[in-house]
Image (cartoon, rainbow, N blue to C red):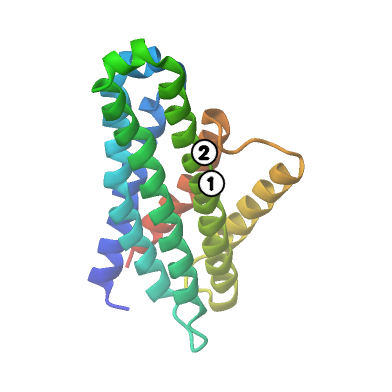
C-alpha cells in the first residue's frame, strides 16, 4: 500500500473524527417546536458539521479497506457496509438537522394556526430519523467487526486495535440485549465516542510509516 495514500487516509480519519466530536458536543437536546426554532442556528450548524465529516470518514474507511485487502476481498464488503451506514447518517442529519428546522422557520403562521399538523410533521421526521440511526449503527458495527477480525488474522495493524473493535461490537450488542437506547442523544453520544476512539486509533496508526 502506498504510504502517501495510507497517510492521507489516516489524516482524513482524524479530521472526520474531530468534526464528529464537535457535532456531538454542539448537538442540542430535542424539544418542542419552539425549542427547535430557538436553537435553530446550533441545530443547523452541528448537523452541517456532521454532514461535512462523512466524506472524510468515508475516505479513511476506504484506506482501511485497502490496507486490509486479502484474496477474499471481504474488506471491500466491510467498506460497502460502512458506506451504507454513512449514507444513512447523511439522510438522518439532513432531515433532522437541516430540513426540519428550515421547514419550521418558514412555517410560523402554520405553527400558530395548525399546531397539531406541524407536530405530526415533526413526528414523521423523527420516524424517518430513528431507523436511519439504527442502519448507521448496525452497518458501522458490522464493518468494524469484519476489519477487526482481518486485523487479527493479517497483523497489518497492531492486534490490540482488532481486539478493541471486537470489544466495542460486543459492548453494543450487550447494550441492545439489555434494551439500552442508543438512538436518544445520550446513547448516541456514547456510541459515537466509542466509535471515535477506534477510528482515531486507526487514523494515528495509518499516519505512521
Locate residue 184: give its quadrant. Answer: top right
Identify the residue at horizontal 41%, vertical 50% (top origin): 200
Callout 1 environment at 10 Å: few (<14), some (14 to 19), or many (20+)?
some
Identify the residue at horizontal 35%, vertical 55% (top origin): 57
Would residue 142 be found to the left or right of residue 197 on screen? right
Discs 2, 1 touching: Cβ within 8 Å: yes
Residue 131: give its label.
1
Residue 193: give its label.
none
Query: Dividing the image into 4 quarters, which one contains the C terminus?
Result: bottom left
Answer above or below: position of 61 versus 36: below
Q: Where is residue 190 in the image (x, y as percent from the top left)?
A: 55, 36
**Does residue 207 show up?**
no
Answer above or below: position of 55 versus 100: below
Query: Dividing the image into 4 quarters, which one contains the N terminus?
Result: bottom left
**Gap between marks 2 and 1, in whole Å?**
7 Å
Would residue 198 be found to the left or right of residue 111 on screen? right
Callout 2 environment at 10 Å: few (<14), some (14 to 19), or many (20+)?
few
Instruction: Name the front one of labels 2 and 1.
Output: 2
Locate residue 163: give its quadrant. Answer: bottom right
Residue 127: give its label.
2
Answer above or below: position of 60 versus 119: below
Q: Residue furthest bottom?
A: 71
**Does residue 88 show up?**
yes
Q: Where is residue 100 in the image (x, y as percent from the top left)?
A: 34, 31
Amino acid at each position: 500500500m502506498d504510504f502517501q495514500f495510507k497517510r492521507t487516509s489516516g489524516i482524513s480519519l482524524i479530521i472526520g473524527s474531530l468534526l464528529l466530536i464537535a457535532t456531538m458536543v454542539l448537538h442540542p437536546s430535542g424539544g418542542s417546536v419552539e425549542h427547535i426554532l430557538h436553537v435553530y442556528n446550533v441545530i443547523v450548524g452541528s448537523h452541517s458539521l456532521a454532514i461535512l465529516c462523512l466524506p472524510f470518514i468515508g475516505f479513511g474507511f476506504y484506506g482501511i479497506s485497502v490496507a486490509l485487502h486479502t484474496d477474499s476481498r471481504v474488506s471491500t464488503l466491510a467498506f460497502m457496509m460502512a458506506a451504507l451506514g454513512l449514507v444513512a447518517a447523511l439522510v438522518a442529519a439532513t432531515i433532522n438537522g437541516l430540513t426540519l428546522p428550515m421547514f419550521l422557520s418558514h412555517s410560523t403562521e402554520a405553527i400558530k394556526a395548525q399546531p397539531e399538523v406541524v407536530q405530526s410533521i415533526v413526528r414523521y421526521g423523527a420516524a424517518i430519523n430513528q431507523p436511519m440511526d439504527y442502519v448507521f449503527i448496525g452497518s458501522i458495527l458490522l464493518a468494524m467487526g469484519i476489519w477487526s477480525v482481518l486485523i487479527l488474522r493479517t497483523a497489518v495493524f497492531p492486534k490490540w486495535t482488532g481486539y478493541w473493535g471486537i470489544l466495542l461490537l460486543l459492548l453494543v450488542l450487550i447494550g441492545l440485549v439489555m434494551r439500552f437506547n442508543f438512538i436518544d442523544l445520550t446513547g448516541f453520544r456514547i456510541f459515537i465516542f466509542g466509535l471515535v476512539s477506534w477510528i482515531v486509533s486507526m487514523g494515528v496508526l495509518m499516519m505512521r510509516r
